[in-house]
Amino acid sequence: TGVSGSGKSSLVFDSIYSLAQSSFYETLSTYVVKNLPKINKPNVYKIDNLSPCVLIEQSKLGQNPRSTVGTYTEIYTYLRLLYSRIGYPIYDSSYFSFNTPKGACLKCNGLGVELSVDLDKLIDFNKSLNEGAIKHRTWKVGSRYYNIQKAINYFDMDKKLKDYTDDELDYLLYQEPINYMNKSSGFVQNFSYEGIVSRLLKRQGDSRGLVINDYDKTFFKEISCSECHGSRLNKRALEVLVNGESLIKLLNMELEDLYEFIDKIDDEVAKEIKDKILRDLKVLIDLGLGYLTLNRGINTLSNGESQKLKLARCIDNSLNELIYVMDEPTQGFHYRDVNKIIKVVKDIVSKGNTAIVVEHNRKFIEESDNVIDIGPLSGTNGGELLYNGSYNGLLNVSESVTAKYLKNRKKINKEHKELKDYYEVSNININNIKDENIRIPKNLLTCITGVSGSGKSSLIRYLLKNDKEIIKVGRDTVGISSRSNVATYTKVFDSIRNLFADANNISAGEFSFNSSGACPKCGGTGYLKMDMHFLGDIKQECDECHGKRYRKEVLEYKYNNKNINDILEMTVSDAIGFFYDKKDIIDKLKIMEDVGLGYLKLGQSLDTLSGGEIGRVNMSSYLYKKGNMYVFDEPTVGLHLKDIEELIKVMRRMINEGNTIVVIEHNLDFILGADYIIDMGPDAGKNGGKIIFSGYIDEILNYDTYTAKAIIDYLMEE
């Protein structure tokens, strides 16, 4: 543990894990290694007693719409095998896969959804055609298709669309192509008229117009496939039954119900397959994922659900003497579920393995056999081993920031700020949320809480989909690249380059290492990379620009006696002092400093940052913007208790400037500092999806919810 940026990731992932992997690669043939991810050998003198490592990262599982809980856990693979062996009629297992032509629904190609035109996005029914009722640019006033609508002389162009008859609307929207002849201009003109929706649907299916399709998609919504009804499979696959049920019925069962169904199968041919499926299901159920279905898309899972699926792969494993390297395994977990994760990790250790865990969770640190604290602070002020021993011993280390915050627990916010106005949404229906209404107070810090699977992420997805003014802040939007650094990602570098350009009367592009200003030899990377095939790439400092990325001529241009490379070598805090009179630059830099990133260099590549640092860099790129509402998805992931305190201060400043902040969060230190809480539950899956409490943070203590119990337990431990 240790404050964010203190060196935890460098020690655990960049040193221990990297050396273990590169050493393991040396035992394999070059033919095998060349097909594996490349690992660079770290600059480490020696690590004793090193074993092969299993890495459980902090990242989400991906956004592939074809990846489901069933495909990721491979339980779906065994169900396909089961149906191919004891189902009737008899087909091989490929006929039960929605990712193969044999099994996929022909209409949706195995996605389970199809696109339908969203009339609310396409048309403003309170306007006439002459007033621009059609929002799509192809039918804007004065366009070719607008003139066709006018030329056919069928529509009253000044009549509000809400006053159109059913026949008029049908002709406007759904009419199939029909030929017209227009003689009004003095010569015969032939043209074709087609309804707007009819034409959009045809364009959407035309693979030639990729750019048009991307724009058109903004006027579409996803609905369940009308042929397979969301099953993804074709009719032939759905006709095969096991114990009277089709495969899709099993894929849509909650895992607990599926376990009971599989357990009742009595067929000697299927015994081995059945036992494997039951073992895998039990692991998921024990982790608290019994409410999920195998058909649930991976891209719809919360952080906590994704993390549990990763852990599930490690549990039913008989290997020992491995090192499990984990990056915040409790991220995304409700206080109630943290004990389950601690038990999983202890079970892994009890089999003769070692677990090295980067973690900030109070409970997890307290339950650890050994605690290593890195610090004392971040960046150049960190990187030291402050403590290595028992949890109780850590509390006595005076120079440890971690010890200070572990001993001093946060008090609950008892201030009842005036509720002046609300953001209200009614009849919410998505996943396990049915006909719920929500009221979010404006200009306050609101936490959305609840156990994993209770409906928090689904609720936020619904809000974002139905209100484009809401600004979502999440780490899933960060594109990590060696060419993207702190300054470029937060857009502050645009202002800096313009400043240099004005001062030297040349183009701002000259000060971009990704453009005309780049060193011709290294292309603006600052290093030369030598491909070592199956070994990790070797990077050497460029001998022409000496790691500075720019052409020699560019570095001769100065602003206040500093060249562009000097600026990129500055820390955020140093740059604030240097650009003291440039408000547009200062505003962005100050936010980074406020979220505890003052120690980062402006030119530091994003691929060298820890998870907590990346989250805060991403956050700071949004916080200078003005919006009706900000929605944060677990902003405390990767943050030390000290950094959480700073984060709350920044959000308070945003609220004082007139913004509304909504946060999905499990961290009790953060929750206790909120103004308002919306608790989802009472449990997960079909037993969740309801707003069981909504009110001031201290009022929830009077209710019987898992979140209330967690807060009470936290306060009593003080």
Image: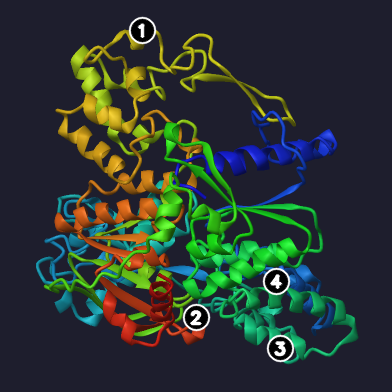
Q: Tell me how far mark 1 sits from mark 4, CA to CA.
A: 60 Å
Pointers 1 and 3 in contact (CB under 8 A)? Answer: no
Looking at the image, is mark 1 or mark 3 earlier in the sequence? 3
Q: Residues within 10 Å of mark 2 (few under 14, many from 20)?
A: many
Closer-to-camera residue (439/189): 439
Q: CA distance from mark 1 to mark 2?
A: 62 Å
Residue 553 circle label: 1
Q: What residue is rendered at 60% in x and 62% in y?
A: 67
Residue 355 shows in the view: yes
Badge nearest the viewer, 3 or 2: 2
714 or 96: nearer the eye? 714
Left or right, residue 396 beside residue 118: right
Q: Nearer the viewer, mark 4 or mark 2?
A: 2
Q: Which amino acid does the dot numbered 4 rest on?
A: Tyr
Residue 245 vs residue 453: left or right?
Answer: right
Q: What type is the residue that disc 1 sits on? A: Glu
Q: Position of residue 679 (x, y in %)?
A: 36, 78
- What residue is shown with label 4? 76
What secondary structure is found at the residue carrying circle 2?
Answer: loop
- Please name the residue that numbered disc 2 is placed on: 684
Q: Residue at x 60, y 67 (%)?
A: 342
